[in-house]
Image (cartoon, rainbow, N blue to C red):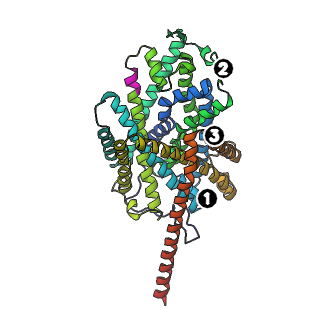
Amino acid sequence: MTQNPNASAPVAKTDHPQASPHLQRGLSNRHIQLIAIGGAIGTGLFLGSAKTLQLTGPSIVLTYAIIGLVIFLVMRTMGEILLSKTGYKSFTDYISDILGPRAGFFVAWSYWFFWVTTGIADVIAITTYVNFWFPDLDPRIPAFIVIVALLALNLPSVKNFGEIEFWFAIIKLVAISLLILVGFWMVIIGFSANGHTASVSNIWAHGGIFPHGLMGFLDSFQIALFAFVGAELVGAAVAETHEPEKTLPKAINAVPARIVIFYALPLLAIVMVTPWNQLDPSISPFVSTFAMAGIGIAAGLVNFVVLTSAASSANSGIFSTSRMIYGLADDGNAPSFLKKLSKNGVPQNALYLTCVLLLFSLVMLTYGDSVINAFTLVTAVATLMGIFTWMMMLIAYIVYRAKFPERHAASTYKVPGGVISAWVGLVFFVIMILAYLAQDDTRTALIYCPIWFLGVWAVYEIMRKRHARKAAAQSEQLESSQS
């Protein structure tokens, strides 16, 4: 971020000289490609897709395709701006530079809030998956073990984070690939079970492609959208990516193909194997499809995959929140002790803070359903923070095009459709926010969102005044020393 001329605002830096130690570029092309894949394949695909199918039927494929296209456009805007200036460490840097430090402050803290709450939710989810194999185990034990393990794996170097995400993503890819192969094989041989035959006609034979009409189709977006939150993670890892000008475009350009392969094809396979209205929304369609194929370990297999998916999300949360809070501290917008780096360039104090916050999951597991219900509301608010982040990225691109036409002209990675694409994305997200008014839990989350923004605004104003007093004191000291 460039220095804001208003000295009273919290400072935002990007072009400052790096001290030693500093963030290391330990993420290779292999890591970035798999982080991009893992970020685009959320736990919602494995668990939430059955409920989404109940809402919208076979048109679920179109739901994911539309969301995937919009997210691709968001990531293209992110890619163009990040590569237009070498000083940018993440998307929050360019938002601060282009829209001002206040906007960057709001996005950074909101994105941090999203990942902390999501990380807590993931830790809680992991305990339920462990309960599948060890029903008598105190859930606080696996929760604590997961937090300590992720901390231990992330402390040595950023490369460790990349390796963990690489193998987590590989597990997801193998599971999805197996489902596609098994599903299409069952269609080819005309497999029959429970009075149903696997067939391409199942796509339209049970009420059509839009069995619940337009409203059912729109309702499905609320659940499906959450599966894509995290796709922008590659934009938070730029400062630690080797040759970002090569690896970032490769990761982003592959998003459309990945949406087709890892969302459209497996969902088509599920719908063709079992009529959408016969699926149990409480059971993962991956489990049902594997079980129908006679794979006896289907439940355990999918439980393992979903467990690693949740662990992957928690791992991403630890990475992104620690880097986000490090950036805030480095810019003077968070306590200075949080910008301390280890000798390997890892923001260790920020990592410790994140893991301490994840321990809040133990409190929730202790106090039961009433707290979990409250946390469900917080998670819904956090999801809206993801939408807010995407919208700010699109707004930043529109302003970037107006303020820096020369940088756009020199870009070798221009956004397809340019500003029009950014406006299309904004309109889409506005429609999504309006759709959130249709459901009780999401409507309540929308009501609570202004409380978060008011709190962030209050903190920003406090810090702005503190910076102003500090700058004034330094100015008086300088004047007195010169007189």
> How far apart in space, not on screen, are marks 1 and 3 (Cα)?
30 Å
Disc number lying in front (2 or 1): 2
Q: Magenta stretch: give its range.
A: 297-302
Q: Is residue 139 left or right of residue 246?
A: left
User: How packed is label 1: few (under 14 Cα within 10 Å), some, or many (20 or more)?
Assistant: many
| Residue 208: image tag | 2
Q: Position of residue 185 (x, y in %)?
A: 51, 14
- The image quadrant that residue 427 belongs to is top right
Q: Which residue is mark 3?
A: 435
Residue 336: quadrant of the picture: bottom left
Q: Please give the name of the residue rendered at 66% of the width and 57% of the height, measured from the top-left corner.
A: 404
Identify residue for label 1.
Answer: 98
Q: Give the residue type that dot 2 points to.
A: Gly
Q: Could you tell me residue 442's position as x and y percent?
A: 56, 42
Mark 3 burial class by Cα count in 10 Å: few <14, some 14-19, many 20+: some
Tell me if residue 300 is in the magenta stretch. yes
Q: Is residue 201 above or below residue 328?
A: above
Q: Amino acid at mark 1?
A: Ile
Q: x, y percentage for residue 361?
A: 37, 45
**Residue 375 appears in the picture as rendered:** yes
Q: Residue furthest right?
A: 420
Relative to 406, is 239 on the left or the right? left
What is the C-alpha distance between the residues marked 3 and 2? 23 Å
Residue reaching furthest to the front: 370
451 versus 194 height, above or below = below
What's under tag 3, amino acid-wise?
Answer: Ala
| Quarter of image, res 309 | top left
Q: Does the residue at mark 1 contact the one at mark 3 (Cβ under 8 Å)?
A: no
Q: Residue at x 57, y 29 (%)?
A: 260
